[in-house]
Image: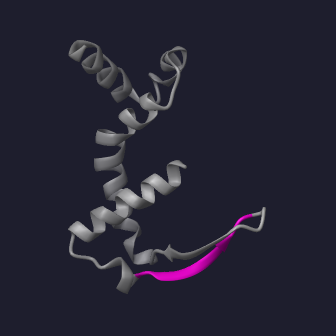
Amino acid sequence: MLFLILVQVFNKYIKSRWYNPEKICKTYTHIYPDWRHINWVRQYSDSLYPLFTEWFQKEWLKKRCAKYIIERTDDHVFPFLQNTFPSIIEYEEKKKLEK
């Protein structure tokens, strides 16, 4: 599910940068192992990779990742995530202060 969220948010980001995903991305039908089909899945060009990595590091990891993980994780897991995602601690402390 995380991958789908990332793609949706990145898609909005590239639209905000004046890229038109419908014109720069190929589409294909994705087939899952259980034979479900999803039509019109976008295949992003390799030329967008630098833009994706920049967005992922500056936007997703710093501004959105902590909130995404906290909303989907049990409280007892947070101590294990502190080293990997320091912003989780900051976000959790702000959340406690707001209450």
**Picture layout, residue 26 above or below residue 80:** below
Quadrant position of the C terminus in the picture = top left
Q: Position of residue 5 (x, y in %)?
A: 45, 53
Start and end of the magenta stretch?
A: 25-32
Which colour assignment does the render follow?
Answer: one colour
Residue 39 falls in which quadrant of the image? bottom right
Q: Position of residue 77 (x, y in %)?
A: 54, 19
In the image, residue 54 above or below residue 99: below
Q: Measuring 35% from the left and 47% from the top, which residue is drawn there?
A: 60
Magenta span main SS: strand
In the picture provided, is 76 more to the left or to the right than 51? right
Q: Quadrant of residue 21?
A: bottom left
Q: Nearer the viewer, residue 51 or 21?
A: 21
Outermost right residue: 34
x and y percentages locating residue 50 in the rendered image:
36, 66
Along the line of sight, which residue is nearer the eye, 36 or 10? Answer: 36
Q: Residue at x 29, y 14 (%)?
A: 96
Residue beneath the point at 77% across and 63% down: 33
Residue 77 lies left or right of residue 6; in this view the side is right
Q: Does 90 sit above or below residue 49?
A: above
Q: Is residue 46 magenta?
A: no
Q: Nearer the viewer, residue 17 or 28?
A: 28
Identify the residue at horizontal 31%, vertical 25% (top origin).
91
Position of residue 54 measured from the top left corner of the image (x, y, whole percent): 32, 57
